[in-house]
Image (tube, rainbow, N blue to C red):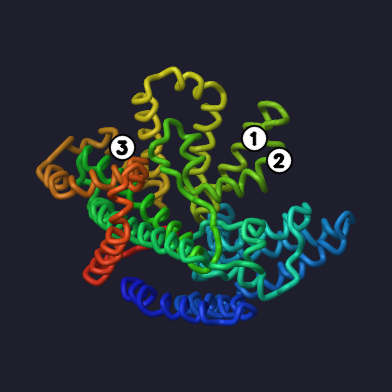
Amino acid sequence: MVFSSLVFLFVFLPITLLIYYISNKKMKNLLLLILSLIFYAWGEPIYILLMLFSAVADYVHGLLIATFRGKILAKFFLLSSLLINIGVLSFFKYADFFIENLNLLLGAEFNLLNLPLPIGISFYTFQTMSYTIDVYRGRVQPQKNPIALAMYICLFPQLIAGPIVRYETIEKELIHRRVTLQQFADGVRLFAIGLGKKVLLANNIGLLWNSIENRSFSELTVISSWLGILAFALQIYFDFSGYSDMARGLGKMFGFTFPINFNYPYISRSITEFWRRWHMTLGGWFRDYVYIPLGGSREGKVKLYRNLFIVWGLTGFWHGASWNFVIWGIYFGVIIAIERAGLHKLLSRAHPVIQHLYFIFFILIGWVLFVFDDLTLGIQYLTIMFGFSGNPLLNHQTIYEFYTNGIIFVIAIIAAMPVVKVIENNKMVTILSPFIYFAILLLSTAFLVNESYNPFLYFRF
């Protein structure tokens, strides 16, 4: 992973930008498609065919839906498109999950398929579905240029881990776009910030969680268990938001404006607010394509809560083919339903510190459910956190972990707050910003060269 990251930074990306900028305007989409396919083939060459199949299928379906718009055939072709996309996603991501559970229910011994999960399939499948649904709704016109549509689906900056870019967001830019010097500079700035989040913050804070997660639970203390899940909470935030910033920065360098995916989620005072700030493109997708079509909150309390549980069950399942993700999603659905039922009004009267402590408490429990695929381990970890396991409150190892990780915790917590915006807007910082971003790039590269721990957590989804 480290070698691949360095090759991407110093070989693939500079060559791609150079080829793109010197190419003829009419050739840019084709070149960007080819370069995106090369990027994807770097890790999974065979699954290029799967991605191209999705592009061809949705290109044809988009044209057919538009041709028969207003007629029953349009609905038929929309359903056909959705079945193909959901079918492909289900086969590669969920087939073994269904086989395992079928074996448990029936006492059968069906063989697992053991298919490797295509990287980014959850992201680009949702993008392709948004295209055909919006064509059916009349929100966008069908793309008549197959190269442009294939490039939208395969576009490498956001292909692997989002943000989920809807077709309507970049519809015009697929055909007409230009890159100004200011836009390129903004892209470099965003990319540097994202790389710094990932390499300098996520990787370093993640080392503590990696150490605690792989330790025998009998060796943990109550304090170290809370310290570990806090480290994971910060790691996954800087890992995923860092990737999203890098994707947005690269998008700007190629003339695209991708949506913001994170808005300082850890300053939230409720779980509802958190999910308006975390992975915003996924939340928006489920809102517009599942929650609202089901009736949203328009058809009474009973259907409102039903819709919430459906959406959050699907949100959890989207993250992975494991029961812990489903329970994780339903866990948040229950809390959000309770907040909608009146808890939110009650919380609004409490002191902001109380509101924030409430949020931190429940979000950390949620991350325990998320991080352990084995629910038994997750429950064991929770018993340690709440002192039900007989583990000590504190020991010398925990004190050492506080001592050695204190600085990175402080830096990470400050970086997760909007105070960063205030610092960036300072006149002196503005003047020095080119040197600051260059220093971030330089430090990040140095860390990549010297460190072997460089996971991208959301690649698995």
What number is the disc on residue 383? 3
> What distance separates the C-alpha of mark 2 from that of mark 3?
38 Å
- Left or right: 68, with 143 as reference point: right
Nearer the camera: disc 1 or disc 2: 2
Residue that numbered label 1 is attached to: 306
* Callouts 1 and 2 close, C-beta under 8 Å: yes
Residue drawn at x 32%, y 61% as measured from the top left = 434
On the rendered image, what quadrant is the N terminus found in? bottom left
Nearer the camera: disc 2 or disc 3: 2
User: Which percent across, then down, holds residue 299?
Assistant: 73, 30
Say which amino acid is labelled 1: Arg
Say which amino acid is labelled 3: Thr
User: Which percent across, then down, holds residue 10?
Assistant: 35, 77
Nearer the camera: disc 3 or disc 1: 1
Helix, strand or loop at label 2? It is loop
- Left or right: 243, with 48 as reference point: left
Q: Quadrant of residue 85?
A: bottom right
Residue drawn at x 67%, y 36% as measured from the top left = 296
